[in-house]
Image: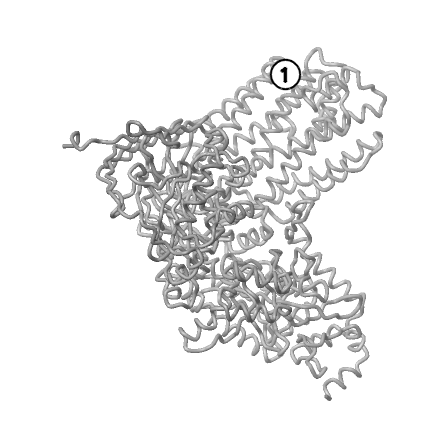
Amino acid sequence: MRYDIRLRITHDYPGAAGTGRHQIRVVPADIAGRQRLTVQQLVVTPAAAEYATRRDFFGNTATTVMHDTPHARMSIAMRAQVEILPRSGDLDVSAALTDLPGDIASVTSLSAEAPHHFLGPSPRIPADDGMAAYARACLSPGMTARGTVQAIGARLNADMAFDAQATNVDTPASEAFAARRGVCQDFTHIMITCLRSLGVPAGYVSGYLRTEPPPGQPRLDGADAMHAWVRAWCGTDAGWVEYDPTNAITPAADHIVVAVGRDYDDIAPVQGILRTAGPNVSTQAVDVIPVSDNVLR
Amino acid sequence: MTGRGEQIRDDDLARLLQAYRRTAGQADELVLPDGSLRPVWRDMAAHLARLSPSEIALRFARGDRYLRDAGVFYRKYDTSGPAERDWPLSHVPVLIADAEWQQITDGLKQRADLLERVVADIYGENRLVADGFLPASLIAQNPGWLRPLVGVEPPGGHFLNFVAFEIGRGPDGKWWVLGDRTEAPSGSGFALENRTATSRIFPNFFARSDVRRLAGFFRAFQQAMEPQRGEDGQKGRIAILTPGPMNDAYFEHTFIARHLGLLLTEGEDLTVRKGRVLVRTVDGLHPVSVLWRRLDAVTCDPIELASASQIGTPGLVDAVRQGGVRMVNALGTGILETRALLSFLPKISRAWTGGPLALPNIATWWCGQPRERDHVLANRERMMIGSAYATRLPFDAGDGTSIGGGMDTGALARRFASEGRDLVGQEAVTLSTTPVWSDGGLVARPMVLRVFLARTRDGWQAMPGGYARIGSGADTAAIAMQQGGMVADVWVMGAAGRAGGQITAAPSLLTEAHPQEAEALPSRSADNLFWLGRYLERAEGNMRLFRAYHDRRGGGLSSDQPLMRAVQGLIAPGSGEATVMPRQLARSFDDPLEAALTCGSRVRDRFSVDGMMALQDLVAAARKMSATPIPPDDIPRKVSVLLRKITGFSGLVHENMYRSTGWRFLSLGLSLERAANMCTLLAELARDDAPDGALDLLLELGDSAMAHRTRYAGAATPTSVSDLMALDDSNPRAVLYHLSRAKAHIDHLPGSSEHGRLAPMARLGLQIHTRLAVETPDTLTPAKLTGLRLGLWRLSDLISTTYLH
C-alpha cells in the first residue's frame, strides 16, 4: 500500500516571536520490513537560520530549526510518500506473561530496541495504582504477553470514549483515565501505564492514519491529526508488537510510523521554546491518501 | 594510659570534657577507644580549655558576625516557604591528621578515576551491562541516564572535573564512602566561608598551627578550567550556571563567581547559535567556553531534556554534542550518584583495576538478585531500604528510605518479589562523633565529611580540608541542614604541628582583577539593576507621600480636605472618593520594596555585601512596620526611620559602588523614576488651582524646603517651586538634574552611538532633556510636565528593548 502524506502545522504568536528553537519529528520513518519512505520534504516557514537533522537515541529522525528574527507565524509543511510493506504472522509466538521477566533479563543490552527502556516510569508515565488494578482485572490465567496486550487494549477501547474536547496535549493520563475520555495520546499513555504495571515493556508510537477508509469501512478515530498507538515487547521470539487502543486494532496497512519512544515527551511532533509572551495558537492538518500504483507509473 | 592521666589532672580540660560522652560502638574524633585524646586534637583541646567561658562566647560571636556581615545564608524549605537562614556554623573545627588525610584522598582519587571510567562506559560502549557488571534496568530505568547524551564525548575529554564524596568513619575507626556527588556538588564555597569564620574565632591558634590552606586548590582548578583560544582566535568565558536565587546554595554560586571572577549566569542568559553557547550581555552576545554547572543536568535544556524546565537553555545539549561548550561536570554524570551503584563498584574495581577499592564504600545490596534480596530480608533490622535510583544519603533522603523499608517481613518480601530491581538495602551507617560546643563544654555529635576533588592540570587534587556536617542531636538523622544540622570547618593538620612562616589568617582567595569579566554585564543583571533602581525610588517617593499625609492628619486636617484628597490620589491613583486605610496606603511602598529586594537578590554577585545587607535591612524594617499596629500619631516618625534607611542605601550606591555598566543601569533606573514622579507631583501640586498648602507639601516631598528658603525670599509661589524642582540643574531633587544624569549614563552605555550617529534611545534622551532645558517656570505647564513623564516612560521602554531582552 502506498500513501501520499501531507501535514501542515502552524503556530500563531500573539506578539511577534523573537528567537525560537524547535525540534521536529513528523517525517515517516524508514523501517526495514515495515515501511519504505520514498519521498520526503519538510519545509519550515519562515526559513530557519539554522537547520539540522540527526538520529535520536531511539533511531528517530529529529530536525532542529532555529529562528533568530521576529515572526508572527511559523508553519511546518511535510510531504512524504510511504510504501507499507505486507506483513505476515498473526501467529502468537509471544512469551507467557509469567516467562516475560526471564526473557527481559536475558537481554544484556541498552540498544534502542532493548525492552529495559520501556519499563518503570518515564516523564509522562508515572506509576498509577488505579491503572495497575484495572490492568490486573483484565488478566486471565495462562495469558501470553500478546494476549495481555490485546485484552487490555480491547477493554480500554470499550471503556473509554474518544473525545477531542476532553483533554489537551498536557493532560495527565490519570485525568483522562478517571474521566474515561480522551484522544489517541491518552488511550496510548493509559495502555502503556497498564502494561508496564504488569511488567510488559511498552512504548509510544507516533504516526499517521489513513484519512479516508476503503469503501464500505468506517473512518478511523484520530485520522485528522497525527496519531499515536502502543508498542509492547512480548518476549524474545515475538519482539515488538503494536496495538492501537483508540481503534482496538492491530496496526497494519493503515498505520504509518513516524517515531517511537517511551512516551509522548520523547517524540512530541514539535518540541520548542520561543522567547515570547502569551499563549500561542496552533493548528494541524493531515491528509493521508492512498496512491494507486497506476498513478505513480 | 599516662596520656589520659596527664590530661585528667588538668582541671580546665576536665571541665571542658565534663559532658563529653562517647557512644559505645561508635568511633570518636576527639577521644580514642582507650580514653586518651587523639594526638591531632591535643593542642586544640588544651587551647579551648584555657579560654574562659566569656572569651569563648566573644570569639564565637566574632565568627558569627563575620558570617552575617559576609551575608552567608542558606535557604530553608519548610511549610512557610523558602526562607533565607543564618549559616549554622559549629564553631569548633574538625581536625584530621595529615597522614590520615593522605590515605583518605588517595582512596578518593582512585575512586574518582574509577567513576570516570564507569560513566564513560555508561554513555559509551556499555561493556558493564553487556558483561553483567551492571543490570541493564538500573541504567535504562534511571532518571539520571540522559539518553540525548548517549554516545556524546564530553568536550574537553573528561566527564568528571569537580566531584565530592560523602565519607564517614565507621566503628572500627576506618573511613567509608557513603555517597558520590558527581552532578553539581555544593559546599566548597561554603567551606571557604567556614574557614574564614573559624580562623577568626581561633586567630592565633590557626596562625601558629600547620593547618593546610585552601586557596591553592581553587587556583589550580580555575587554571585547569581556563579555556583555550578557539579557531576564530576568540577565547570564551568561564561562567557559572546557577538555577537562580531560589536554590538553597545560591549564596555559594554568587560567592564563587565573585571570588574567582567568573560570570554568574542563569539558563535564560545563555543562547545557543551554531553549536556555540553565547551569553546575552548589554554589549551583545559573547561566547562562553566553559560552564561550571550548578544545576541538575535534566533541567538544562527544555528541548532535549525535561521539557517542563523553566531554568534551562534551549539547545544546550546540541552545543555539547557539537563540542561547543565544556561542562563541569558533563551532562549526565548525575547517574553516578545512584545509590545502587555502590553495590556494584567493588566488583567493577576488582575487574578493572585488579584490586579492591582503596577506600571502601558502605555495604549495599541491590535487591534485583535473589541472593542479595534474601540477605537484605534476613538482616532487615540493620538495613536502610529504599529506592535503587536514590541519589541522596539515606539519612538525608526524605524519600521513604528507612530501616527495614518500614515494613514487616511479609510485606517486604512481597515488595521485593514485585519490584526488587528498584530497591536497595544499605547497611545503616554508624558515624563517628566529633566535638561540638554546648553549654560551656564539649559534647559529641555525629558527623559526615564532604571532601572535594578537582581535576587540575596535574590530575585530581583534593581540597585540603572540607565541609563537615554535624548532627544537632545524637541521632544520625539530625545531620541534614534542613533538619537543623550544623556545619563545621575541617582542618587538615600537618605533622610538624607548627607552621613556618604562614601568618595570614586566611589568605585571600584570588585578588587578581578580572576586568573583562566584570564588564560583561548579562542583560538579566542589567534588567534587575535597572528595576532595582526604579522600585527603590518608587518606594521612597510613596513613603514621602505617606508620611506627609499622616503628618497632616496628625496636625488636624481631616481626610476630606482638598489637599488630603490630592495626596491620597497621588499615593493610590484611582482610589477616588473612598477613604483609604493606612494599611492600603502602606502597600504603595511595601510592594515596590519587596520587588526591589527580589531584583537585588538576583544580582548579588554584582553587589557589595554591605549593599545587599542594607537592602535586606530596609525591607525587614518595612515588613516589621506593616506587621505591627502603629498609633497614627507615630506613623510619620516610623516612616522617617525607613526613609533614612533608604537614603542610606542610595548613598551606598552612589558613594561606594564601582562605576561599572551595572551601576549605570541602577542609577539610570533611579533617575528616570525620580524625574517622572517629580513631573507628576509638579503637574498636580504646582498648578494654579492646586489646594491650599500644596506648594509647601511639594517642597517637603522634594526635600527642598531648606533650599527654597536659601534661594528665594518669602513664601513659595508656583514659579519659585517650578524653578527649584523642575529646572534647577543643581538640585538633586529636580527633574532637570535627573534628566542630565540619565543622559550622561545613556551616553556611556555600549552602543549609544555608532559611527558618530546617536542610537534611538540616546536621541530620545537628548530630546527629552532639551525639551525641559529650554522651558522657564512660566512656560512649564502641567500638560508639558505630563508629556515629559510620558516621554520618560517611552525612554525606559526603549532602554528595555535595546538591552534587556
Tell me the chain of label 1.
B
In the rendered view, tell whether residue B162 sits above or below residue B251: below
Is residue B50 positioned above or below B507 on the image? below
Q: Is residue A261 visible?
A: yes
Classify residue A114 by image quadrant. Answer: bottom left
Q: Nearer the viewer, residue B684 or B568?
A: B568
The outermost residue toward the top is B689
Whether residue B269 is visible, yes or no, is no
Residue A153 place in picture, x, y as percent: 43, 42
Return the x and y of residue B441 as percentages of the image width and height: 78, 70
Q: Quadrant of the C terminus of chain A?
A: top left
Q: Please state, as top left, top right, bottom left or bottom right, where the N terminus of chain A lies in the image.
A: top left
Between B483 and B286, which is closer to the camera in this rendering?
Answer: B483
Residue at left offset 72%, top offset 24%: B699
For badge 1, the amino acid type reads: Pro
Which residue carries the number 1 mark?
B777
Residue lying farthest front?
A: A141
Counting the numbered discs, the total is: 1
Q: Is residue A226 above or below residue B90?
A: above
Q: Position of residue B688 (x, y in %)?
A: 69, 11
Query: Quick one: B416 or B327, which is closer to the camera?
Result: B416
Quarter of the rendering containing residue B315: top left
Q: Is residue B458 left or right of residue B428?
A: left
Query: Considering depth in this image, is A77 or A64 the residue closer to the camera?
Result: A77
Secondary structure found at label 1: loop
Q: Residue B484's image quarter?
A: bottom right
- Residue that sits furthest to the bottom in the current view: B2
Label 1: how many residues lie within 10 Å, few (<14), some (14-19) or many (20+)?
Answer: some
> x and y percent of residue B236 in the render?
40, 50
